[in-house]
Amino acid sequence: MKTAARFAIPLLVIVAVTAWAMTPVVDHLMTGWFRSDVEMRSRLIFQSVQETVLTHMAEGRTRGLDSLFRRIAMDQRVLAVGLCGPRGRLVHASRAWPARVACPRGDPAGVVFTTAFDRGDPLLAATFPLVVKGRPAGYLVILNDLRFIAQRSARFDLYLGIGLALLGLAFAAVTILVARVTLRQWVRSMKDSLVTRTPLPGEQVAPEIAPLVRDLRKMMRDVNFLRGAADSIRIDWTAETLRRAVADELPGAEIMVLSNREPYIHNYQDGEVVMQRPASGLVTALEPIMRACGGVWIAHGSGSADHELVDAADHLKVPPDRPAYTLRRVWLSDEEQDGYYYGYANEGLWPLCHIAYVRPIFRATDWEFYVEVNRKFADAVVAEARTGDPLVLVQDYHFALAPRMIREHLPQATIITFWHIPWPNSEIFGICPHREEILAGLLGSSIIGFHTRFHCNNFLDTADRYLECQVDREHSTVSIGGTPALVRPYPISIEWPPSALVGQLPVEECRKTVRDRYHLPDTMRLAVGVERFDYTKGIPDRFHAVAALLESHPEWIGRFVLLQVAAPTRSRLPAYTALQTETAELAEQVNRRFGTEDWKPVILVPHHHEPHQVFELFRAADVAVVTSLHDGMNLVAKEFVAARDDEQGVLILSTFVGASRELLEALIVNPYDARAMGEALHTALMMPADLQRDRMMLMRESVRENNIYYWAGRMLFDAARMRKRSRIEERIVHAGMSKIK
């Protein structure tokens, strides 16, 4: 009985649902048929009485019209007949004409059928033009009663339901009989095939269930793998984990990175070649991935000695100590650099996406160089590709057009574009004069990644507003021409454990070294900020916060110092040179106002620091100040947390950076409010050691679990699923084409 019910009940439910779903369709068809029949009858009536009506109208014989209208209304479908004047006023009508129904609007060119209602009953008004000597003389209106349609539909629905119910019962009976026999055979075969014992020699699976058994066995293996992978996602994402995951999920995949900034720069210094690691969150994030997975990194060769170290193909094996991947350098002329990088990218897109109240500048010549350089780098990717379906990781706002350009030559490539800066709302992005081209270029990607869901939503809104595309918000995709691009949040992070932490002295020794370097007593409380000299980083606002702290809490005068390290960048742009001048002057003002002969509250160090030097500063600090006015993620905050293996120190973090969504135990501040930031500094300096430890432990756990390998793993797993799905679709299409041939 249970088996019978298991088959019969769903089948009967399906039949019932089918009947319910078919009823509106059938009703619609029947209504259309009956209405067409009524319309045809109305036409026939009009054709038969048209001349008579015109004659009576010409002779003014209303009695003749009464007699004619009575005869027409004898038809069981006709309710009433009326004569309307050229201006739509009822001139004459049969007695049954409803008082609430006015003359419908007619058309001198032909018949008009409209629906009217009298006390809720549907009527079909057929309005025929009466023409005398080429001019409209009025309209003959035939009102048809449509109530019979509903009555007939109800009877038909009843008969249809009874018929489907009987048919469903018959199907259910046959299905139950067949299912019981088949189910017993399948259960017996499945039990014999899925047992854990080793199959006997020559033992084979029944042919009818062999594909199912094979798929089930594979699914069981996949479930076991995914379960293990899911466990490791949260606790054990390392370089080796990522390397194994790529080997398993993307076997043989050719991995390529495209970015403007290169991970290793070679410059001449005092006649010698010196290698430098750039102060870039992008490099900090991607370099460990390339060391783990290998591949080719294509970037602009910007160093003065970069030409000297590459081979004939502009290749260089890196890192220098343990080569793991290839750096391909692309060369740009000074004009290209000025137009593409300093112009369009950093005077246009950078201020557009960072709401820091610097006006974006868009020049036509800059755009031409931006297109040209994007094409040059896209061609480099195509030239370096050894296969037709490489996995290309396009980085940041410098290459918004490159994904579409790469797709033109490598249609099977899996292209992941990660936008490292914020994406503004659609209204702000509308300022860009090339918004459609930028969006179309990015949508050449297979996957588009942002730091936060908020930025993803902004992108979806922007695409929906400015492009003719299909936006699926449930699955977070944007499709142009039927090809979807997946839009996902991937909060970027740093490697764990950080390589810059290797070889670091204990925290107490770091504190002593840094204080001796800057001539600070051991009792001096130290806050550290490490940034590039950029107007989005809010460095002047920090100095105002220091002034607010010393005003409100003068007890910190002579006992507190902010050490601000700022690496010069983009110094050829007026906004950046003005920022450096303003920052130096503001630091001097604060120092003159509050400082003494042997103490200055602000120490500004406008020099680049290597990663191990930055970590030394973080380990020596009591407080880290990361108060960008607007930022995508800001990895400096996570580097400070990673540097503090002593679980001490306080992080002051801007609410306008992506890291504030993860490092909730930091002191979250509004960088535009100097007084509130001053109070946050006071709170940080007064925080007890045990509370610092509790907060730092939670933040370190977050950074450890959500490290750079986890970030890369999520993107690569999404890419792997996309590639597998694409391969299956290709096989299906190929099989279909083979059958057609």
Image (spheres, rainbow, N blue to C red):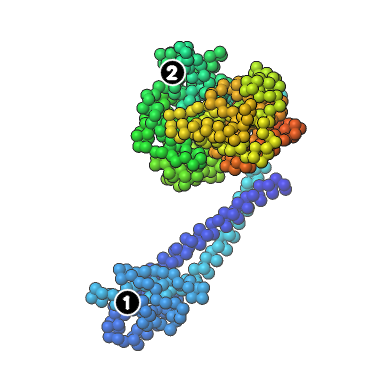
Q: Residue shown at 62%/40% (left/top)?
A: 548
Q: Residue shown at 53%/21% (left/top)?
A: 277
Residue 320 percent coordinates (x, y): 53, 14
Q: Which mark is residue 718?
A: none
> Does dot 2 land on a helix, a strand or a loop?
loop
Q: Earlier in the sequence, mark 2 or mark 1?
A: 1
Residue 449 visible in the shown view: no
* Vertical position of residue 42 compared to residue 71: above or below: above
Compare residues 616 and 314 and report the one nearer the observer. Answer: 616
Where residue 99 sits, quadrant-wise, is bottom left
Compare residues 93 and 242 and report the one nearer the observer. Answer: 242
Amino acid type at circle 1 is Pro
Q: Which residue is mark 2?
A: 304
Q: Which residue is mark 1?
A: 86
Compare residues 395 and 296 and report the one nearer the observer. Answer: 395
In the image, taking residue 576 as reference, residue 44 lies left or right, namely left
Q: Residue shown at 35%/37% (left/top)?
A: 364
> Does dot 1 land on a helix, a strand or a loop?
loop
Residue 94 percent coordinates (x, y): 41, 82
Residue 594 percent coordinates (x, y): 62, 34
> How would you rate the neighbour count of disc 2 (Cα within 10 Å): few for under 14, some for 14-19, many for 20 or more?
some
Residue 546 visible in the shown view: yes
Residue 733 percent coordinates (x, y): 46, 34
Work out which residue is located at the far right of the displayed protein and give it: 690
Amino acid type at circle 2 is Ser
* Vertical position of residue 171 compared to residue 39: above or below: above
In the image, taking residue 553 as reference, residue 163 lies left or right, namely left
In the image, taking residue 407 as reference, residue 201 lies left or right, namely right
* Vertical position of residue 142 compared to residue 450: above or below: below
Q: Residue shown at 65%/17% (left/top)?
A: 503
Q: CA distance from mark 2 to mark 1?
A: 89 Å
